[in-house]
Amino acid sequence: MERRVREHSDPPSRSSGPRGPVLHIAVVGFHHKKGCQVEFSYPPLIPGEGHDSHSLPEEWKYLPFLALPDGAHNYQEDTVFFHLPPRSEDRGTVYGVSCYRQIEAKALKVRQADITRETVQKSVCVLSQLPLYGLLQAKLQLITHAYFEEKDFSQISILKELYEHMNSSLGGSPLEGSQVYLGLSPRDLVLQFRHKVLILFKLILLEKKVLFYISPVNRLVGALMTVLSLFPGMIEHGLTDCSQYRPRKSVSEDVGQQYVPPPSDGYVSLSSVEDGSLGKEEDGQMMSGCEDGGKSKIDVPLSQTEDNVSETQASKDTGQHLKPPSRTSPESSESDWETLDSSILEDPCSKEGEATAVGRQTEIFPKETAVSESIPITVQPQANTGHTVFVPGLISGLEEDQYGMPLAVFTKGYLCLPYMALQQHHLLSDVTIRGFVAGATNILFRQQRHLSDAIVEIEEALVQVHDPDLRKVLNPTTADLRFADFLVKHVTDNRDDVFLDGTGWEGGDEWIRAQFGSYLHALLAATLQPDSEKLLSDFGTTFVAAWKNTHNYRVWHSNKHPALAEVNPSHPFQGQYSVSDVKLRLSHSVQNSERGKKIGNAMVTTSRNVVQTGRAVGQSVGGALTTAKSAMSSWLSTFTQSTQSLGE
């Protein structure tokens, strides 16, 4: 099996400019023979290479296809958000924003020899360490417009100035909601999807394979990231591990990626090294011990099972265990991969009594050890200083608030890819990936229905869930319908008030995010109650049971969060049934079930036919009456004339 040596060098030298969140500025163009390629990068993507080098780091080999999206030639301009894997273990997701434009070749002042087509297509791309999608987009659109207005693509000084400006203006500033959520509108999302927004929310909580589909790309990435913004702290701190995948080097590598049947006991043993020096796994991710800051990260593809068994057999008694999923078909998205327990925090580096917050703890236990008798770890609530305080999570490795937010959804092989290039299609069926929330514009993704659990058609506001059992799990309760209806009514009543955009008023973007935050806090608080069956029934008994088996819930539940004691552990819209609830249920059933849609269409067709028949009958009867009136008038006129003649 072909092995890959991960690059552990720091990002390219930036001695010419200040260090900041922006890693690189790049220009991607379309070559008539070579296809999409990087034409310029500052600083160079690979240290030692020139600014005009086409070479790419192995981890970023899909960059040209992400920055210059499929079908971009159909649009004059477009914007793309995408995620790239980190190039070293001590870094997180690289957030990419790309602005695409095209210009007629005859309009160029300087036309290079390799320009043979009538139009020139290029993207200006920013690679950042911070998820400032909308803010970067706003700055990048202006620079891209100015770059194209030069009509000479060799003038790259403006791009270097952009790099310096972004790092000087964004460097050192903490992430704020107003910056992170710029351009993401939950109001528009609720207006389009209405009651189905809650279904999207629950799909991601269940860590299902969700594919968003629409063209052009800016509508795709905007809708997908807006859904994620409904989760407290998710965009700010929850996406640092959301792009941990291994690029495919060749087609032959597919054979090596095939599922290997597990041993008879169903486990793979990963040794626990006591001396603080863990070996390097060339084909997976690096595993480092005490000398790497106490971090321990294990990500071993199943295809490496046979290679690793011999190395780990000796430490079977003290090792951690990885249980393959019970179902290995591509349709499977059940999270049977891992269960977490507080005992995994027994770090050999801290035997001398040092209490260190160990980031990115991802040791894995079989599902049978989910219930632990040991005392869970307590995370003390932070003082209310007017703003949310985030501290490193002891297990998730994410920056968490006093409620344990954000949930560790996008970790351990659950990907978030706002835009997927066609070259990344193999990721949908990769057995090392638990699930994904991904966006696509190519119809080939949508046709592969068996590779996802749900397809979200943004244009038609449809959420197509393939599995009937999953549809039952996602079926909203009466309290859920009240919650969704509450959102829809407030947003609809104020839909024409432009002053609500981006504000905290009722029906505004921040208000909607706050409602989903309260919903999630109440759900979490309800799971902690001793007799919670009745409380959880308002959220959906089957849904909660499925959610408790997910990785993000087990990570959250392995800690204690005393701040939740102040949260009301009941559904925000619990209460007695009423006539309005029956109307809500009927309306939801008609709009979302296949049978309801057929009945609704039949009612519309029948109503239309009745109206048309009534008009036809009216016209027929009216015509007969008119004819009869004319005949009677003619007869009376003739009779009158005859009478007058006889009288004379």
Image (tube, helix red, strand yellow):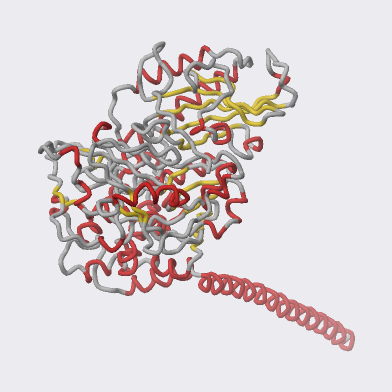
Residue at image location 51% in from the left, 57% down from the top: 452
Residue 183 image offset from top left, x and y in percent:
42, 37
When asked about the image quadrant of residue 579, the answer is bottom left
Q: Does residue 209 sit above or below 283 in this rendering?
A: below
Left or right for 496, reference 143: left
Residue at image location 59% in from the left, 56% down from the top: 448
Residue at image location 39% in from the left, 12% down from the top: 15
Residue at image location 45% in from the left, 46% down from the top: 224
Residue 300 image offset from top left, x and y in percent:
40, 46
Q: Does residue 420 sit above or below 198 in this rendering?
A: above
Residue 210 image offset from top left, x and y in percent:
47, 54
Left or right for 113, reference 396: right
Residue 74 image offset from top left, x and y in percent:
66, 38
Looking at the image, which is closer to me, 35 or 500? 35
Q: Does residue 325 sit above or below 444 in this rendering?
A: below
Kindly tell me whether residue 520 is visible in this rendering: no
Left or right for 5, reference 628: left
